[in-house]
Each structure stands twice: as structure tokens, then as C-alpha cells.
Image (tube, rainbow, N blue to C red):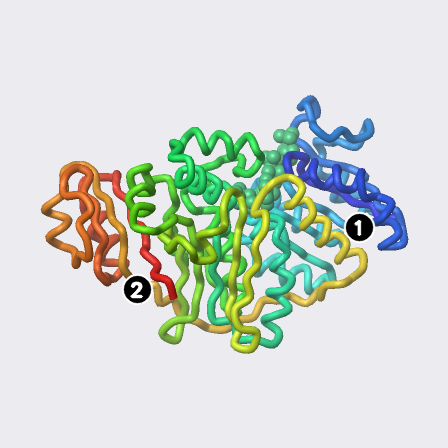
């Protein structure tokens, strides 16, 4: 019997238990032995759970899992950063494969945990950490064996895409839609990680590092979220044939790389424009494979649990490599080369002052708020201008043309 320990029993953890309850027999046929969820770590034993487990399975003591010699695989789905790092290290030290959906911990300790697992001859798998239910990390690891991947970009946060879709299609207010995304289990425990772009930044750190083969740190990534976007912005861009998406992108550029998370106005009719609700979509470009695009559920209980359990099956059947997929190319950060045309909106009566400093394609509104579409401009000079104004109330959205 293969025995699993799971750290966390929230949205994703209960999804894992639910699938195991419903697919136990099929899984047993596939792997040739029964699969048992032996112990599950929670913070509170009294909390009501949607998916019940047998008496005695829940525990508040992580060491009932981490020191249990019968447990071969630890599933980490707490969302916590500091504790999960300690738990994962302890699990690996004790010879257990680790599967996690926790992009915060993978992003923070990607190299250390990958090399530690390799050294111990163990699996460290994180398919659900980026793209939720979309199985694209495994194909990405496959692709980098044969391809030079020049870029990877995508809609990587289900909560943000859900909010932006509702604001675009139904004209709804930002804060009410965020509450809905939380109720549906898409958002992080602290949803500011979603709406401020941090969650997308962490995912980009993971998949950009894999794709480009160079360590792209969190600090390497320029990060803006959707929390400053207003209904006014969405409407004005929609009137001009654009849909706003939060896009993370890492690409080779100028002998180095650029890495950025930013609200982006994509033309109606483009492939990203059609990705609605909590869906995600990721595209990477290999020199042999060409562009490969993966689209599917970016968050949610069952899609995410499905990705987690797919990793668990790979651990049991040994169907992924235990060698670290990371490479150590020395690429310099070239974010200073980022430029483009941007939609800008500034509140607080900065009209003439702002407009006079920008190359302009179109003035959308001259009065408070000031809104315009710039001609080509360097992003760093635009950000410098925004930082120098005495207002926190502004938005910058990159304009993407149909290619
Ligand atoms: P969640 O609903 O907040 O559940 C977290 C669970 O972990 C809870 O059961 C909580 O215990 C437990 N927990 C948290 N911190 C703990 C700690 N320090 N020690 C012990 N137990 C702890 O989170 P989730 O939505 O399932 O997400 C879990 C992870 O998957 C996160 O890293 C998230 O980013 C990632 N993820 C989520 C989704 C999604 O759609 N939700 C998709 C992809 C990836 P209590 O229940 O007792 O409070
Ligand atoms: N909060 C995350 C999202 C969960 O909304 O995308 C999936 O990683």
C-alpha cells in the first residue's frame, strides 16, 4: 500500500481527498497497489470540512507525517511560506518525495529544494504551482531538453482573470467580484497576493527559470497587479477594441532577459482575449517546437487537486526524472530595455503636467482623471514619472497590437 501524508486540508487538500475517494479503485489498478491518505495536517481540528475523513486522520502535529516511516510521499498544500519550507526540507531529509501546489515556497526556494531532491534521489514536483489545473510544467520540462525556449508568457492568475472578465463583461465593481472569487476558492488566503500581482510574479519566477534555463529571481521581475485598475480604465480600453488581462512574461532580450507582470490590453479576437473567468493560458516558444499554448482551469478545487495527484502518480510510477530540470545559464537582467505603447490614467488634477511629458497617440480624457494612450516610450521612464507624482491613484496598461 502506498501511503500519503498531506500538509493542509483547505480547497486543494479537500479536492485531493475527494478525487481519491471517487477514483481509488481506478488508481489502485493503475499503480498496482491501494493508495491511502494516512495523515493530514491542519491548523484547526474543529473546522467544518466539505470532504470528511476518517476519525484520527487529521492532526495538528506535522511530525506525525514528516517522521512517519510508512509515508513515502508528502503533499504540501498549506499556502504557508515559512512553515512549508521547513516541512518540505524535513520531508526530503527523511527520504520522502514531495508534491506541492505552493508557488510561494517553490518560488522562494526553487534552486535549493530542486537540488536537494536531486541529491537525495527523490521527486520534487510542483505541477499545480503554476497554471492550477493545466498540466504544462511537465511538457515544459520535456521541451527544454530539445529546444531553446526564447519566451514564456501567460495569464497565470485565476482570481485576476475572473475579476477582469466580470469587470469587462458585466461592468461589475472590483471589490464585489473579488469576494466572489474568494467564495469560489480561487483566491489565496491573503488575496492581495493575487490582485497585486505577487502570485503571478511567483509563477513567472518558476516557469521563467525553467523555460530560459537561467535563475530569474523574484527581484528580477517588474510586478504590477490589477488592484489599481478602475471600471473607467476597462471601459475606455473596451471601447477601443481591447480586453485587459494580467500577463506575466519572461523572454530573452539583448543578450539577457526581461521579466515582467503587468496589466496588458490585448486586442479582441486575440487568443488571450478569449480566455475568460478563472481560466489561465500559457504559451512558450521553442526554436524547434514553435509556439505551444496550454489553456485550462487556472484555479479551483478539483482542477488543482487533479494536477497534484498527477504528480503523486508520477512519484509512485517514477514517470518523471528525479534530476533537477534547472540549468545555470548566465543571463543578465535587461528590464531597462522594456518599452511600448501604454494606456495611462492619472487621478488628482495632474492633466497638463503629465500629458506634456509623454509622447501621445491619443488623449482619452483631459480632465480628472487624465487618460491617454502613449506612443512608444520606455517603461522605466513612465514608471519614474508616475512615482514622481503626488498621487497613488494611477494605472498603466501595456497596449498589445495584433501580431
Ligand atoms: P486554503 O484553502 O487556505 O487551505 C490551506 C490549508 O492549510 C488549511 O487546511 C489550513 O489549515 C492549512 N494550513 C495553512 N497554514 C498552515 C500551517 N502553517 N500549518 C499547518 N496547516 C496549515 O488554501 P488552498 O486554496 O487549498 O491552497 C493551498 C495551496 O495551493 C496554496 O499554496 C495555493 O497557492 C495553492 N494553489 C491553490 C489553488 C486554488 O485554486 N485554491 C490552485 C493552485 C495552487 P486549517 O484548515 O485548519 O486552517
Ligand atoms: N490564487 C491562485 C489563482 C490560485 O487565483 O490563480 C491558483 O494558483
Q: Is mark 2 within 8 Å of ligand 2?
A: no
> Quick check: 143 above or below 132?
below
Distance between the alpha carbons at the discs numbered 2 and 1: 46 Å
Which residue in the protein does label 1 denote?
Answer: 72
Residue drawn at x 37%, y 39% is: 227
Query: The C terminus appears in which quarter of the rendering?
Result: bottom left
Q: Quadrant of ligand 1?
A: top right
Residue corresponding to mark 2: 336
Is tag 2's residue or tag 1's residue first in the polypeptide sequence? 1
Place of residue 217 in the rendered image (x, y in percent of width and height, measured from the top left): 46, 59
Disc on res. 113: none
Identify the residue at horizontal 20%, vertical 46% (top origin): 364
Q: Residues within 10 Å of mark 1 (few under 14, many from 20)?
A: many
Asked whether the viewer can see residue 93, the reply is: no
Q: Is residue 100 above or below residue 186?
A: below
For residue 68, side relative to residue 115 (left or right): right
The answer to whether the beta carbon of the residue marked 1 is less than 8 Å from any atom of ligand 1 is no
Q: Quadrant of residue 374?
A: bottom left
Q: Position of residue 60 (x, y in %)?
A: 70, 31
Asked whether, in this view, residue 8 is left or right of residue 56, the answer is left
Quick one: 213 or 225, which is closer to the camera? 225
Identify the secondary structure beneath mark 1: strand
| In the image, residue 136 above or below residue 214 | above
Residue 161 rendering spot, x and y as whole percentages: 47, 44
Instruction: Tell me what residue is drawn at x 62 percent, y 66 percent.
Output: 141
Mark in the foreground, 2 or 1: 2
| 37 vs 344, nearest the viewer | 344
Q: Can see residue 1?
A: yes
Residue 260 position, x and y percent, is: 39, 57
SS under mark 2? helix
Amino acid at each position: 500500500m502506498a501511503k500519503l501524508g498531506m500538509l493542509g486540508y483547505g480547497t486543494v487538500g479537500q479536492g485531493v481527498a475527494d478525487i481519491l475517494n471517487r477514483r481509488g479503485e481506478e488508481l489502485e489498478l493503475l499503480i498496482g497497489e491501494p493508495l491511502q491518505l494516512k495523515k493530514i495536517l491542519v491548523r484547526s481540528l474543529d473546522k467544518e470540512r466539505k470532504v470528511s475523513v476518517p476519525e484520527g486522520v487529521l492532526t495538528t502535529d506535522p511530525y506525525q507525517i514528516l517522521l512517519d516511516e510508512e509515508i513515502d510521499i508528502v503533499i504540501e498544500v498549506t499556502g504557508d511560506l515559512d512553515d512549508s519550507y521547513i516541512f518540505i526540507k524535513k520531508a526530503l531529509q527523511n527520504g520522502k518525495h514531495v508534491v506541492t501546489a505552493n508557488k510561494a515556497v517553490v518560488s522562494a526556494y526553487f534552486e535549493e529544494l530542486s537540488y536537494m531532491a536531486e541529491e537525495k534521489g527523490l521527486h520534487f514536483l510542483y505541477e499545480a504551482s503554476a497554471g492550477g489545473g493545466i498540466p504544462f510544467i511537465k511538457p515544459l520540462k520535456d521541451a527544454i531538453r530539445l529546444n531553446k525556449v526564447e519566451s514564456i508568457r501567460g495569464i497565470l492568475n485565476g482570481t485576476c482573470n475572473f475579476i477582469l472578465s466580470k469587470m469587462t463583461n458585466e461592468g461589475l465593481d472590483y471589490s464585489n467580484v473579488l469576494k466572489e472569487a474568494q467564495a469560489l476558492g480561487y483566491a489565496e488566503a491573503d488575496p492581495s497576493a493575487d490582485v497585486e500581482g505577487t502570485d503571478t510574479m511567483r509563477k513567472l519566477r518558476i516557469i521563467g527559470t525553467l523555460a530560459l534555463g537561467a535563475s530569474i529571481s523574484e527581484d528580477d521581475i517588474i510586478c504590477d497587479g490589477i488592484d489599481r485598475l478602475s471600471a473607467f480604465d476597462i471601459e475606455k480600453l473596451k471601447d477601443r477594441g481591447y480586453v485587459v488581462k494580467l500577463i506575466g512574461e519572461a523572454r530573452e532580450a539583448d543578450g539577457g532577459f526581461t521579466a515582467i507582470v503587468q496589466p496588458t490590453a490585448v486586442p479582441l479576437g486575440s487568443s488571450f482575449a478569449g480566455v475568460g473567468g478563472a481560466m489561465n493560458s500559457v504559451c512558450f516558444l521553442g526554436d524547434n517546437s514553435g509556439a505551444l499554448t496550454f489553456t485550462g482551469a487556472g484555479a479551483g478545487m478539483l482542477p488543482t487537486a487533479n494536477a497534484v495527484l498527477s504528480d503523486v502518480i508520477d512519484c509512485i510510477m517514477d514517470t518523471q526524472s528525479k534530476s533537477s530540470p534547472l540549468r545555470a545559464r548566465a543571463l543578465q537582467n535587461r528590464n531597462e530595455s522594456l518599452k511600448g505603447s501604454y494606456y495611462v490614467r492619472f487621478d488628482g488634477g495632474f492633466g497638463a503636467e503629465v500629458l506634456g511629458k509623454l509622447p501621445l497617440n491619443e488623449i482619452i480624457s483631459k480632465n480628472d482623471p487624465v487618460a491617454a494612450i502613449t506612443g512608444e516610450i520606455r517603461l522605466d521612464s513612465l514608471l519614474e514619472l508616475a512615482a514622481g507624482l503626488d498621487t497613488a491613484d494611477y494605472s498603466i496598461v501595456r497596449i498589445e497590437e495584433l501580431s
